[in-house]
Image (cartoon, rainbow, N blue to C red):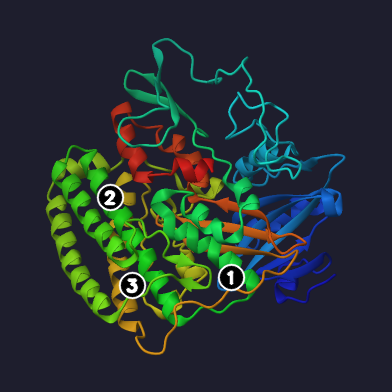
Amino acid sequence: MHDTHPLLSRFGFERFSSRKESNMLIVLVPEKDLIPAVKSLLEEQHLELKTVVATDERRTHQRFFIRYIFAVPKEAVFFAVELSVPSMTATFPSLVSVNQAFALYEQEIKSFFGLEPVGHPNPSRIILHQHYPKDLYPLRKDFAWNTSFPLQTEDTITEVQGVLGEGIYQIPVGPVHAGIIEPGHFRFSVLGEEIIKFEAELGYVHKGTEKLFETLPLEKTLSLAEHISGDSSVHHALAFTQAVETLSEGVLPERAKLIRMVCAELERLANHFNDIGFIMLDTGFSFGGSHGARLRERIMQWNERISGSRFLRGMIIFGGVNRDIEETLADDLADDLELLETDFKEVITIAKDSDSLYNRLKETGRLEKQIADDYGVVGVPARALGKAMDARVDFPYAAYEAVQFAVATEEYGDVHARFLVRIKEVYQSFRILNQVLALLPFENSSLKTPLGALPANRMALGMVEGWRGDIVTFVATGSNGKLDRVKVRDPSFINWQVVPHALTRDIVPDFPLINKSFDLSYSGNDL
């Protein structure tokens, strides 16, 4: 089957079999053409890789499929290169030689589907720790979610590469950390206090989220999406509902779109206030830490007032929103946001007078732009290197095309740059919220559109700009019209890879500061 979409001729893909599904243009590429096809999209068309999705379709097609999904800004379509992987061979060519961004996806596919990336420089298993049986592939269709299996009791010690040499020591940290931080194991190789090498072992909060999506009734999947990463409940719910709504071809009421934006920007404000405060606190500037926590609490109280949940859970539903923001409440929120913005400006003005604060932030945890490009870094760390990438602008959803705001960027890529990007984004969130509250219609406006039956054997993608970076959710239905595959790509899955590269000039006491400047999710990575 051949689609006639103009992107096919523009990208030079007319010779391949293609089809349009929802918001995806899918091109089936033979294995021999995979590397040149993907290389042309990256190097000639300058497209951004957004996710790589494997599916087990042996029951219907006797094979697996891998889809490499690229974003085409301003086109409202995602371009997917589709590779067929026969179940008898269960191998596929690695694309790491084309771009480092493919490496982790290929390891994930090997870990969860048992497909071997031929030519991968380090095809080791990720997320699943050593006590999982080696031949266990949880996302294959013949693996039941409630399968019991014996834990491996031998060779379960994590192999740490480390650095050997006179005077070099290793410092293990975690997986259990102080406070309420999620678990993850860090290993520092140090010479004195200087960090020579940093390694992170994640996967301690792997919950089988993607498998659970396949087993739950549709009405229960939204709660699962909200709990992928607790501090991003709204944005994960938005990405998931957008994908499902795209499948059903439903049209959201304008009021619902605007209320969704209110929720999204409140979530962004709460987390940016938290990060800005903790970055200051990690330098010893307690004033900033206290006020960051205080400002966050103001937003959390508004979240509860609007939705009944401090994390806005239950607010996003298929086809719209669950609660209204009535005129009086909207006016109160607008008034308080004005006070909050003034309050925030005062805190930042005082912080700028602290030489010790800015001396700690500058030149610390610098990430090189080439490294960020190689790994496909997204969100705040990317914008701190001058990349003006933001799904709200490049792929506008809800009603973001109706408001004016700027994409916040810096250039230097250190902790200071990431700190400033967050400050700028706070001001832009205030700007967006003021416009949205002024646009809210209060008469003859509904909150939701009933979701129709999902079509069988279809797929779609949802993408939103979470406060960490873009969140991408792929959904596909089976022959019965029920969810057959849900693939979630949290920004932390991408950005955890570059944290070691941001530590190569720093000392151990700077690690908490650098780590907080990325503020990545363990749960969003581990799923």
Q: Which mark is residue 145?
A: none
When the figure is inspected, residue 438 is found, relative to residue 418, above or below; the finding is below
Task: Measure the alpha-carbon separation of dots 1 and 3.
Answer: 24 Å
For image coordinates 60% across by 66% down, the residue present is 244
Image quarter of the C terminus: top right
Mark 2 is surrounded, within 10 Å at the Cα level, by few (under 14), some (14 to 19) or many (20 or more) other residues, namely: many
For image coordinates 36% across by 50% down, the residue present is 412
For this view, does 188 lie left or right of residue 64?
A: left
- Name the amino acid type tagged 2: Asn
Q: Which mark is residue 274?
A: 2
Residue 97 in view of the camera: yes
**Residue 105: % across, % down:** 63, 44
**Of 454 and 24, which appears nearest the observer?**
454
Task: Give the image quarter of residue 476.
Answer: bottom right
Residue beneath label 3, please?
432
N-terminal of the two: label 2 or label 3?
2
Q: Which mark is residue 245?
A: 1
**Of 231 and 421, which appears nearest the observer?**
231
- Name the amino acid type tagged 1: Glu
